[in-house]
Amino acid sequence: DAGVIQSPRHEVTEMGQEVTLRCKPISGHNSLFWYRQTMMRGLELLIYFNNNVPIDDSGMPEDRFSAKMPNASFSTLKIQPSEPRDSAVYFCASSPGQASMTQYFGPGTRLLVL
Amino acid sequence: DQQVKQNSPSLSVQEGRISILNCDYTNSMFDYFLWYKKYPAEGPTFLISISSIKDKNEDGRFTVFLNKSAKHLSLHIVPSQPGDSAVYFCAAISNTGNQFYFGTGTSLTVIP
């Protein structure tokens, strides 16, 4: 199994630009999570989908952040416009769902906003 | 506000000795707890978990202890090995299964 796939692995952009992060969950998993990792706050859950439907987006920092899951095999996290404080590592994770609480993480996207 | 706290950002242990990583939580509604291990430039990987109905779960060299009255859990690694050097995150899941919280992580260094 390829595991959770994230792209790009690294992204450097200028303040004000739009950034789109992509995630392909493990096939058959019906829950998908987006996290942001910072030194100060550790891993923060941004949004959580179950069967492609957003369940909890209370962690999304502000309206500049949006996430979609158009189908079971693809999700995007978009930041528009990006700001330097958005610089972090963004992880996507998937889970089989109710059958298991274990989440499987992708390798992350390291975002730097200049 | 951090609902899951790992107050030790780093820990160094001699190879062969016991490593103890600690985690505190604030919400008594948490029902399930997990430990993840993270190497640089990789995503976290699941290590071990414990349900709130238990106070101990063991898997090889790794044991997780849960003290519900103190809202505290710990991960014991014995004997520690250099390959255990990584960042360890504890995580908690609510009893509704809809809320997930991670700590800030503890960086463990096992000295050969």
Image (cartoon, grey):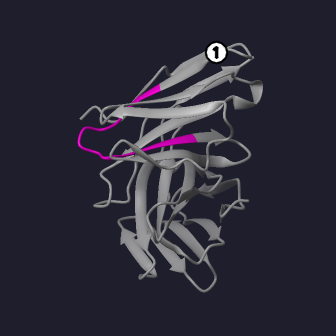
In the rendered image, residue A105, in percent from the top left (x then y), is placed at: 43, 41
In the rendered image, which quarter is residue B25 located in?
A: bottom right
Q: How many marks?
A: 1
Q: Which residue is rendered at x = 58% and y = 55% of the image?
A: B102
Q: Chain of mark 1?
A: A
- Using residue B91 as the reference point, say whether residue A50 is left or right of it: left
Image height of B33 relative to B107, above or below: below
Q: Position of residue A12 (x, y in %)?
A: 64, 15
The residue located at (56%, 70%) in the rendering is B74
Task: Return the residue found at the far bottom.
Answer: B69
Residue B86 percent coordinates (x, y): 55, 46
Q: Which residue is mark 1?
A: A12
* Image quadrant where one finds the N terminus of chain B: bottom right
Please indicate, yes or no, whether residue B44 appears anywhere in the rendered image: yes
Where is B24 relative to B69, above or below?
Answer: above
Residue A32 in magenta stretch = yes
From which residue to which does the magenta span run? A22-35
**Which residue is pictured at 56% across the width and 54% down the height?**
B89
Q: Is residue A58 above or below residue B41?
A: below
Q: Residue at x 42, y 81 (%)?
A: B54
Front-lying residue, B47 or A22: A22
| The quadrant where residue B26 appears | bottom right
Compare residues B76 and A36 and report the one nearer the observer.
A36
Residue type marked 1: Val
Is residue B78 in view from this perspective? no
Q: Position of residue A82 (x, y in %)?
A: 69, 22
Q: Is residue A23 left or right of residue B29?
A: left
